[in-house]
Structure formats: C-alpha cells, structure tokens
Image (cartoon, rainbow, N blue to C red):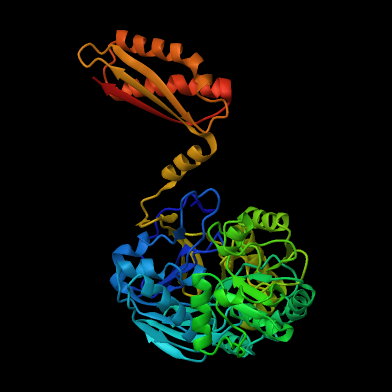
Amino acid sequence: MSHPHPELSPPAPLVDGGVRVIPLGGLGEVGRNMAVLEHRGKLLVIDCGVLFPEEHHPGVDLILPDFGPIEDRLDDIVAVVLTHGHEDHIGAVPYLLRLKGDIPLVGSQLTLALVEAKLKEHRITPLTLGVREGDRETFGPFDCEFVAVNHSIPDALAVFVRTSGGTVLHTGDFKMDQLPLDGRLTDLRAFARLGEEGVDLFLTDSTNAHVPGFTTPERNITPAIERVFHDARRRIIVACFASHVHRVQQVLDAAVESGRKVAMVGRSMIRNMGIAADLGYLHIPDGVLVDLGRLTQLPEDRQVLICTGSQGEPMAALSRMANGDHKIDVGEGDTVLMASSLIPGNENAVYRVINGLTRRGAKVVHKENALVHVSGHASAGELLYCYNIVRPRNVMPVHGEWRHLVANGDLAVATGVPQENVVLAEDGVVVDLVDGQARVAGAVDVGYVYVDGSTVGAADETMLKDRRILRDEGFVTVIVVRDASSGALAAGPEIQTRGFAEGEDAFEQVRPRLVEALQEAERNGVQDTYQLQQVIRRTIGSFVGNKLRRRPMIIPIVIDA
C-alpha cells in the first residue's frame, strides 16, 4: 500500500535507548489494526486485527496485516497486547500464532475469552495473561499500565507503556460516554495522572476525529429501539455486530417489555453472546431467549431475531434474507432494525441489502432514518479534551483513513502540540522516539495479505486483477492445433467466449484475421508456442477493444499434433 512518504528508504538501526513504532496496519484504513513497539531489541505488539474485503477484492475472505517486517524476529516478541475484542483488533491473532504459538496474549477478561474461542477453531491453545484497569505488568523492557476506556464493546483498555527511552500512551478504540450502559467510564483521572508523569508519544484513535462535537451516549438509543418494538406489527429482525454486547442487551430488554421472545441467528453471534453472558457482561432475562425452531412456532408479533449482516456481508443472515435464500422469509409487515454504523467502503453493499428487504415489503429502520446506533469512537470534542488532559509531547494519530489521521493531527495542533511534533504516517512508515522527539525514520515494505479460502498470502494484486477482469470483462478462449512437423495450422482457431452479450457469433469476423496472422507467423519462422500465443492475444485484443469496447481476459491454447 502506498504512503505519503514514497521517497523513504528502509530505516537505519534503532539508536540505543530509542523507541520505535512500526505500524503494520490500521493507518490509512479502517481495520487490521496492528502496531509494533521496539525497544532494546525486543518487540511489543499492540492489537492484531483484520480488514474485511470490499468489492474490488473478489474471492478474498479476510485481509491481514503484513507480518513480513517482524517474521524473522518472532522470538523477540515479548507479548501481544489486545486493547479490546473487535475483529479489527483481534481477528489476525490466529495467523500470527500460526507462525509462533507461544507468544503471550495480554488483554481483559472478555477480550481474551473472545480470542480464545477464535483460536480454538484454529486448534491453537494460547498463552494468556488477563489484566484489568489499574494493573501494571512488565514484558521485557516494556512496563505496561492498563487504563479503562469506554467503547462499543465492554472491557476495552488503553495501554501506557513505560520504557527507558520514553513513554507511549495508546488509547486503542475509545470514546467518552458519560452515561455508559455498563457504568464503565473512560478513566480521565488516569489519563490526567499519566499526563502529569509525562506522555512522550500519544497514539490516539482517529476514526471520528472529523466529526464535530461529542459522540451521542448509548443510552439515548433506548427510546428509538423501544419505539421500533412498539410500532412493529409482525416480526422484528435486528442486525448488529456479533460483538456488540450493549446493543444486544438493549434489544433483550425491549423484547421483555413488549412480551416478545428472542432467537439469535449466526454462529459468531451465538458464540460471542454466549461468552458475554457466561462472563456476566450480558444479562439475559429469564425466559426471553429461545432457539430459532421454537421462535418460529410463536405468533409473528412475538418474534425477535438478532443476526449478523449489518455491513451487507454477502453470506451473512441478513443478506440472505434480502435475497430470499434464507429459511426466514422476510415479507410485508416485518421490521428490520439495522443497529450499526456504516464501515467506510461497505455503503453499496449495505444499501443493496436495504433495497432488497424493502422490495420484499419489510420496513427497514437504520441510522439514516432513526437514532438506532451511535459510534464507539471519540468525536472531535472528546479528542480535544483528551489532548488538554494528557498534554503529550508528540502525537501520532492511528486507526483511520488519511482524512481521519489529518483531522486528528489538526486537533492536536489546535491544543498546543507543535506542528513538527505531530507525526502523520501510514502503514509501514517507521517512527522513532529519541530524546523526547518523535520523527519519521524510514519505511518498511508492507502490503495487504489476503486470506483466500485455505491459503494465506498466496493471492496477490495480479491475481485479484485477473479476477476483476473475469468478473467485469469476461474471457475469450482460442484453441489452435498446428502440425508438429511442419508448424502449419492444422485445425481451428476455435473461439469460445463467456460474459459477452454479443455471443460467439460476433467473433466470426475476427477468425479470418486470426488465421492470416498465424499463417504470417509461420512464414516468418515463428515456432515458439509463447510467441504464437502472443500473436493470438494481440489479434483478439485489438478486435475486441476496437469493435466491442471490452478488455477481456484472453486465453490462447496452442496444441501440437
């Protein structure tokens, strides 16, 4: 992936006593968050998440951070600190532990429970250390203190890292909800105390830095959800993230008040909410939760389903309902509540699902027409408060697209952080903290690592380009048989096409031109199979480009007989 410093060369070795930050994901994008801190020859990893593919990633299941820059230094990793349990922060842990299974994982109770369940599917038993706010642990040369932060999942933590070369405060994802549903506030007193001690480098969540004011409290959503339940005539189908414990709690409470029963749909939803309930983060009222089979036997005005698919994922339950290929047949009078925000890049997929559900007669309630979701990230007003409380010497915005990082940096400058002390970087851009000053030190080569079925890293941009061509432009196969002894054309060319509205008959007019090109190649003594394939490609490509205005994949096959 490109970054705003294309002229950067690989960084020189870290000076003795310095602290290096190597972002392997999460800067310049929303997802696959991963930062590596280096000090005195050891590495501390903060988060290890995934990015979900978009339309221009056909066939890709997940996108991982690029472990390349640390792959030959796995023995130097003293711990992986996980700030919270969202997929964009823990989803790539199994792929890192495949490389070295005994790297210790550090996180809160819920975070570790979620990642352990994920690792169980990969048949990996991790080394874990549970921590909570106020705890302080040492990992090699890194002295880590954990601070409570409020987010859209319980048990989120910021981490303050003390080293002999300086201090680093990493917020993880956070906001400053003053009336949180679970009563767990972002600990601004701890932020202030750490600010008094001295924060040399502040790594701050940038996702909502461009949004003015303050993020709406979660509590404000409850009336809107209750109104949906009051107005619904038939079934209610709620789509949200499989880790959004607070939203599921609000739905369960509303179901009890309206006399409805609830079933959960989707493996990840059932697994995560089971973990949250077992650990006491989700309180399930007696008798409200039933299995799907029992729910469907109840009157439709007593049914509530909670499922995944709020981001338009094609295989998720909600998308399949919108397409009519799910056992739940959504129809007239049903209400669908999409209780989540739009992740950048997913807009088209989400609107397709909304249109599909609406076409089937459902009433779709979503963020644009009702207050049914609020962000889990601090808006500009909250970030200003944090800068004024922490008073960091240097700032490195993290977690967001370039526009988010720039907006966050501008907020830091507005509170008095010198412009030269605000470091804007993207994935792979290395930042060194030396003698209290943060500076870009160079760049390492990083890119997207694709999980494609059972393979990791085998798919590359060339392969994806081929897939996009096949999807968008179609393909043409040309089969030619030549005499092995004389090199003369013996049979063909046979032309087969896929993905063309014009049909194969449209290619009849190029056949004489192709025969002439092959005969001319024979007269010129061309015997090499690859060169003949190139003749076919040029001839077919020129015809299709000029006549049909297409650029398909062309597959020439030359057989000697």
- Answer above or below: position of 3 versus 533: below
- Answer above or below: position of 399 versus 4: below
Q: Nearer the viewer, residue 126 or 211?
A: 126
Residue positioned 45% across, 84% down in the render? 144
Residue 113: image location, x then y, percent: 44, 82
Q: Nearer the viewer, residue 124 or 248?
A: 248
Q: Quadrant of the C terminus?
A: top left
Residue positioned 36% across, 14% down in the render? 518
| Residue farthest top in this picture | 523
Residue 158: image location, x then y, percent: 53, 81
Judge whether residue 244 can be spotted in this image: no
Total count of labels: 0
Residue 404: image location, x then y, percent: 63, 63
| Residue farthest left in this picture | 485
Residue 362: image location, x then y, percent: 72, 62
Judge whether residue 74 can be spotted in this image: yes
Residue positioned 54% across, 30% down in the render? 500
Residue 9 appears left or right of 320: left
- Answer above or below: position of 223 versus 439: below
Quarter of the rendering containing residue 107: bottom left
Residue 223 appears left or right of 527: right
